Image (cartoon, rainbow, N blue to C red):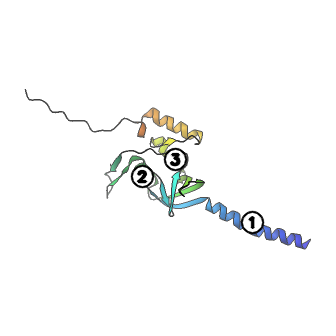
Amino acid sequence: MDRRLFSCALALCLFFPLAAIKAAAAEILGYAIVQDDGSLRLNGRQIRLYGIYIPPSTPSCRVFERPITYAPCAALALDFRIGTGFVHCELKSMNADDSIVALCRAGSEDLSAYLLASGWAIALPDAPFQYFALEKIARHQSVGVWGLPLDPPRQTTLDAR
């Protein structure tokens, strides 16, 4: 009986640290750097946001900052939302290119949901239902990629009479 108790205790000692290591590997926490394609660089790993596709957009400038930031609109919106805070990412899957797909939060806000509500992302087919609702609202409000193009007005020359 003592031998059985010893083997159970040994199994518990070996199992719980491994479970803790697996749980820790499924979460990444740290300061995130937003890449131009809307992915995050966090602790040396490339992280793509879960459930969304960020379509390419024309670069824009954030002139109220010094130095002036120049990047695609989705990256600027994401960078503005994250600010100097930490990001907490929950691993969902791995891509073939060794990037991570994760559900990431800045504070308590889901970053994928934020981009969808701002109109800078499109919900993927396997996304949660609320992502589709946020995308539909953004489309209806004509914000982000769903908005009208913001080309400057063209100047016309008047013919001298």
At 62% across and 58% down in the image, what residue appears? 26
Of the two numbered discs 3 and 1 on the same chain, state the one appearing first in sequence: 1
Q: Whole-percent x and y of residue 155?
A: 20, 35
Badge 2 element:
helix
At 65% across and 60% down in the image, what residue appears? 23
Tell me the CA gap for discs 2 and 1: 42 Å
Task: Please name whichever residue, 42 or 82, is drawn nearer the observer in this view of the structure.
Answer: 42
Tell me the crowding category of disc 2: few under 14, some 14 to 19, or many 20 or more residues within 10 angstroms, Cα based.
few
Q: Farthest left residue?
A: 161
At 32% across and 52% down in the image, what residue appears? 64
Tell me the crowding category of disc 1: few under 14, some 14 to 19, or many 20 or more residues within 10 angstroms, Cα based.
few
Q: Amino acid at mark 1?
A: Phe
Residue 84: tell me if it is visible. yes
Q: Whole-percent x and y of residue 157?
A: 15, 33
Between circles 3 and 2, the one closer to the viewer is: 3
Task: Please name whichever residue, 68 or 39, is drawn nearer the observer in this view of the structure.
Answer: 39
Tell me the CA gap for discs 3 and 2: 14 Å
Residue pointed to by mark 1: 15
Of the two numbered discs 3 and 2 on the same chain, state the one appearing first in sequence: 2
The image quadrant where one finds the N terminus is bottom right
Residue pointed to by mark 3: 112
